[in-house]
Image (cartoon, coloured by chain):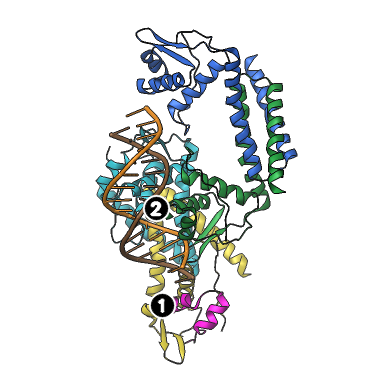
Chain colours: A blue, B green, C cyan, D yellow, E brown, F orange
Amino acid sequence: MWIPIQINENSAEPLYFQIETQLRSLIVSGQIEEGTLLPSIREFASSLKCSVITVRRVYQDLENEGLLLTKQGTGTFVARVGHSERSEYRRMVVQEAVEAAVDAGLSVQYSEEELKALFLEIIKNKYRSQAGEGS
Amino acid sequence: MWIPIQINENSAEPLYFQIETQLRSLIVSGQIEEGTLLPSIREFASSLKCSVITVRRVYQDLENEGLLLTKQGTGTFVARVGHSERSEYRRMVVQEAVEAAVDAGLSVQYSEEELKALFLEIIKNKYRSQAGEGS
Amino acid sequence: MWIPIQINENSAEPLYFQIETQLRSLIVSGQIEEGTLLPSIREFASSLKCSVITVRRVYQDLENEGLLLTKQGTGTFVARVGHSERSEYRRMVVQEAVEAAVDAGLSVQYSEEELKALFLEIIKNKYRSQAGEGS
Amino acid sequence: MWIPIQINENSAEPLYFQIETQLRSLIVSGQIEEGTLLPSIREFASSLKCSVITVRRVYQDLENEGLLLTKQGTGTFVARVGHSERSEYRRMVVQEAVEAAVDAGLSVQYSEEELKALFLEIIKNKYRSQAGEGS
DNA sequence: GTGGTCTAGACCACC
DNA sequence: GTGGTCTAGACCACG
């Protein structure tokens, strides 16, 4: 199975973190279905051109979060989690980032209006360019 | 001079980074005026209960960014930068965080409307509680 | 990999600065190729007989300038920068020194002719002895 | 007596060094005549808006170089040095800077021609703007 | 193995 | 008093 992960070599973010974040998004957004068998660690590592140790860490972390399930000798699957649980997860991922953004605004004394304006501008741009790519 | 910095011992963020981020916010938002003489590294270190090296790194990094100016034997000052430059900096600080938030929304396939709603809710709460503290 | 750095113990210039200057020259002049993996900080420190912290500072400063790229757990690489960017950097390094020299001449009221003559004499000598070493 | 010294607050160069360099240039270029009585340390310090300690160091350093002469209870004078000695001094000041510039060129593998061209360009610009100021 | 952070403490240069 | 450099060594995170 093919998993669309983009690695940015020049990013300061650690490799495992980039992979983890993207895989988590794919799962909680439903782009990878529940029960799906993920690639083996070796396979995934070779397709991502990274160390098996790195993939191992990703699988382990997501298993600890309850998003993956490893069966000895069989492989790693996307866990079956309740609908409500998944949407809660999905919300959490976004909420943290939004809160950080609002905190940043507060820290440099942006007014509520300024911050709203900036946000609406950015959201418009990003969603537009996203739509463009998809077409 | 007293500088209000909050250190979170349990955070994954390195000490120097927490201090740097907060001090940068205080400067670009104008809460510390241009030309102000900051505490000496030893003084600041003792008040923050950290090593002088950590404070030194903070001062040096912000000097590299052009926000501080240090004169040997005299002390460290908030640099006098142009108004436009500072407001640009201020915007940059917020913009990065907002972009990250929108990217997070996109990655779990939030719709534009969902994301806007979440943002407006969080901004309202945070600004309200902020106002409460200030009164 | 072997990097030719000369340290002058008796110089007033700080250690880190001597190393930084020479390494920068090697990079912008292309004597160390893009993408090259530099020695680990520990290795380099031991070969230069200095503290790991001194090497770390060098690597970090040059990374801030955009000349190096470090990946945790992997090592430090010479960044791939555009040709034009590098030649601009290369020019800058020389230009600053030449401007300082001309300023020195002006400050003691050297005439344009005197300064030119002195410069041509020195350049001839230095390039001749350089050629001698290389042969 | 009025001595034209320009202090750059934002320079990384130490205060004493800026003053020393400029005063030395004024003396060896003959812009301050031999035997001239310089301002008292206090006077000079107050006119430069710096500490007396800083001026004291400048006078001391230049006295050690043989350019100044302090008579107890009378003041500090520009020493009477031979013509050849002064011109040698003057040359030395420039020569060091020019050698540093040529070394910089060599370090990034500038060709002799490239370096000459750069030098001639800069010398032309600087002397032209200098002439402009004087007119 | 790699780099990243942080400590405690020393010594020097500047004002 | 101030900042600037450097040391030796510890512990953690990444691959």
Q: Position of residue C93 (x, y in %)?
A: 45, 50
Q: Amino acid at mark 1?
A: Leu
Q: Are the residues flagged by discs 2 and 1 in contact, CB closer than 8 Å?
A: no
Q: Secondary structure at mark 2?
A: helix
Q: Is residue D51 magenta?
A: yes
Decide if residue A80 is on the left or right side of residue C37: right
Q: Which residue is mark 1?
A: D62
Residue B7: horizontal and vertical position, in percent?
51, 46
Quickly name the residue at label 2: D104
Q: Chain of mark 2?
A: D
Q: Residue at x 55, y 45 (%)?
A: B21
Residue for point 57% across, 47% down:
B22
Front residue (pair C64, B132): B132
- On the same chain: label 2 and label 1? yes
User: Does B87 appear above or below B43?
Assistant: above
Where's the C terminus of chain D, which quadrant? bottom right
Packing grade of label 2 (10 A; few <14, some 14-19, many >=20) is many
- Of A34 and D104, the residue lying toward us: A34
Q: Is residue D47 above or below residue A131?
A: below
Q: Quadrant of the N terminus of chain D?
A: bottom right
Gap in angstroms between the C-alphas marked 2 and 1: 28 Å
- Hey, which residue is sitting farthest right in the picture? A113
The quadrant where residue A28 appears? top right
Residues shaded magenta: D36-60
A109 horizontally vs D43: left or right: right
Res. D2 image quadrant: bottom right
Mark drawn on residue B83: none
Please, what is the three-letter code of the amino acid marked with disc 2? Answer: Ala
Residue plotted at (44% across, 23% down): A61
- Residue A7, visible in the rendered structure: no
Callout in the foreground (2, 1): 1
Query: x%, y% of residue C85?
Result: 49, 40
